[in-house]
Amino acid sequence: MTDSLLIPLHVKYIQSLDKRTDELEYWLTEHLRLNGIYWGITALDLMNNIDALPRDQVIAYVKSLQHENGGFGGHTNHDPHMLYTLSAVQILVTLDAIDEIDTDKVVSYMSSMQQEDGSFSGDEWGEVDTRFSCIALLGMSLLNRMDAINVEKAVEFVLRCQNYDGGFGSKPGAESHSGQVYCCLSALAVADALHLVDKDILGWWLCERQLKNGGLNGRPEKLEDVCYSWWVLSSLSILGRVHWIDKDKLTQFILSAQDPEDGGISDRPGDMVDVFHTNFGVAGLSLLGYPGLKPVDPVYCMPEHVISRLGLKKRYQK
């Protein structure tokens, strides 16, 4: 088992992702191309290798994906969606290039997705999910345009998605899930509404996600997965309850999921790696204080130095 973070290999792995055009996976994941750049850029910056991808090419590609309505598609000729729009904003903010796009159109697009009950839909087809509430609030915060949405109603909707066990679901009455907990907590943090959450009850539900092997799962009776090293750990960080889990065992679990030959991190040891789990594994290690990594902001899932550059205050206890 690898007991250290293989940074040079992970950098090479991320650099290789756009050159694998002879692999079926490359074409099957076309709709995730923009998200993949966000995951890659974030991991590279945290590993002190932000220049490993060609900055000008990345910016030009992101710009090319903005639609007339202000939203971004996941790749060329893909429809706009909130998921891709936030990734575009995060990439350009990280690269200090947000002025390269029409941000007023982005604000118009994101704000147009808010519904009467305060929720947000993901696109014109109307799916509602607390993921999109998170996306809208993070996006508006990064663009310094919180005034463009009804924050009070957004908070009311998120709180209606909390369950008796302390967790949050995708909509009112939906099962508690660690990914949705992160989305709801980050949304509430940006809205300065964390005081409305019982931190101990939710913190207990989150710390119960740790299994005997040190990994974290998304909900009861599920397998461990490296990506929950972010969703659960960031939530605990926002609540100031990271010390409620065994950090050393979680660190070893993440490190054990690395590919020691070609780089990258998988969902659990022995599985195929991907850039999604690579990013959230590295981000999780950053939250754990792993040496050699830049600090990550648990609310925005972006390097702390980027959030500080924007002048945004820390909205968590860590």
Image (cartoon, rainbow, N blue to C red):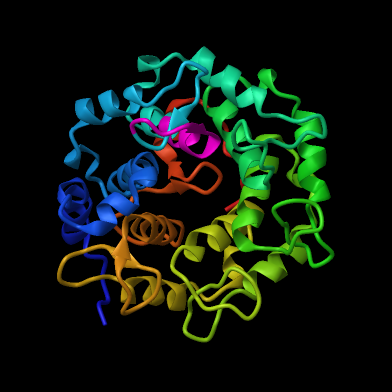
Look at 19% across and 56% down and name the residue there: 13
Whether residue 315 can be seen here: no
| For residue 20, above or below residue 107 | below
Query: Residue at point 32% right, 55% down?
Result: 275
84 in relation to 163, above or below: above
The one of 288 and 258 positioned closer to us in this rendering: 258
Asked if residue 63 lies left or right of residue 127, the reply is left
Q: Is residue 169 above or below residue 78?
A: below
Say which quarter of the image contains residue 63.
top left
- Horizontally, residue 306 falls left or right of residue 115, namely left
Q: Which x, y percent locates residue 67? A: 44, 21
Q: Residue at x 75, y 31 (%)?
A: 115
Residue nearest the observer in this picture, 46 or 103:
103
Q: Residue at x 54, y 35 (%)?
A: 82
Which quarter of the picture shows residue 37?
Answer: top left
Q: Is residue 220 magenta?
A: no
* Span of residues in magenta: 76-88
Viewer-nearest residue: 114 or 180: 114
**Can residue 79 be found in the magenta stretch?**
yes
Quadrant assignment for the N terminus: bottom left
- Percent across and percent down for residue 111 are 65, 23
Tell me residue 89's x, y (percent): 44, 29
For residue 153, which quarter of the picture?
top right
Position of residue 165 measured from the top left corner of the image (x, y, whole percent): 79, 67
